[in-house]
Amino acid sequence: MVLGKATAESEAGQLPTTEAMVAMGRYQEELVKAGVLLSADGLHPSSRGAKVRFDGDDRTVVDGPFTETKEVIAGYSILEVASLAEAIEWVKRSPNVSPGQVGEVEIRQIFTAEDFADVATDEVRAFADGVGEQGQES
């Protein structure tokens, strides 16, 4: 998963230019043709969002905007690649949708069922397979 970090401009609701959107569209088209892109979306500013904090059984809702812009996610892409190195190579080819500004993305690996092989019970695997409790024998 590639997480695009917010900037002051994206948090202010400023949209990329038409040229930047076309460049990103071409890049994403290249990802699709290579069979790498599974999903991608941009996110509205955090002022339109909320956080839910968990503390034991308590839940606290904190409305946006969130103060640390550099920690806010502005968009994401899910790439299916063989390695972190391949993901980095694809991301390095991405256009900068905010020319003249410093942007940053974070690349994170998504867990798969195999990552939990040592701790997953049959019950857990049933949920991972989309069967849930309905598929469990009682």
Image: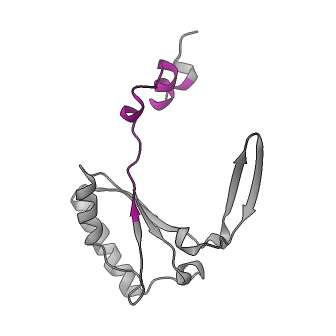
Residue 83 as seen in the image, left or right of residue 67: left
Q: Position of residue 118 (x, y in %)?
A: 40, 25
- Is 66 or 20 nearer to us in this picture? 66
Numbered range of the magenta stretch: 106-132
Q: Quadrant of residue 64?
A: bottom right
Q: Position of residue 111 (x, y in %)?
A: 41, 42
Q: Work out whether 34 lies above or below 22.
A: above
Q: Residue at x 41, y 82 (%)?
A: 102
Q: Quadrant of residue 27?
A: bottom left
Magenta highlight on residue 120: yes
Colouring mode (rainbow / by chain / secondary structure / one colour) = one colour
Residue 65 as seen in the image, left or right of residue 124: right
Query: Is residue 72 visible in the rendered structure shown here?
Result: no
Residue 99 as seen in the image, left or right of residue 94: right
Q: Quadrant of residue 2?
A: bottom left
From the image, which quarter does the N terminus lie in?
bottom left
Query: Is residue 78 visible in the rendered structure shown here?
Result: yes
Q: Work out whether 80 lies above or below 114.
A: below
From the image, which quarter does the C terminus lie in?
top right
Q: Residue at x 28, y 74 (%)?
A: 26
Task: Give the residue at the far bottom of this rendering.
Answer: 100
Task: Give the tally of numbered discs.
Answer: 0
- Is 138 or 108 nearer to us in this picture? 108
Magenta highlight on residue 105: no
Q: Residue at x 47, y 31 (%)?
A: 128
Q: Position of residue 82 (x, y in %)?
A: 23, 49
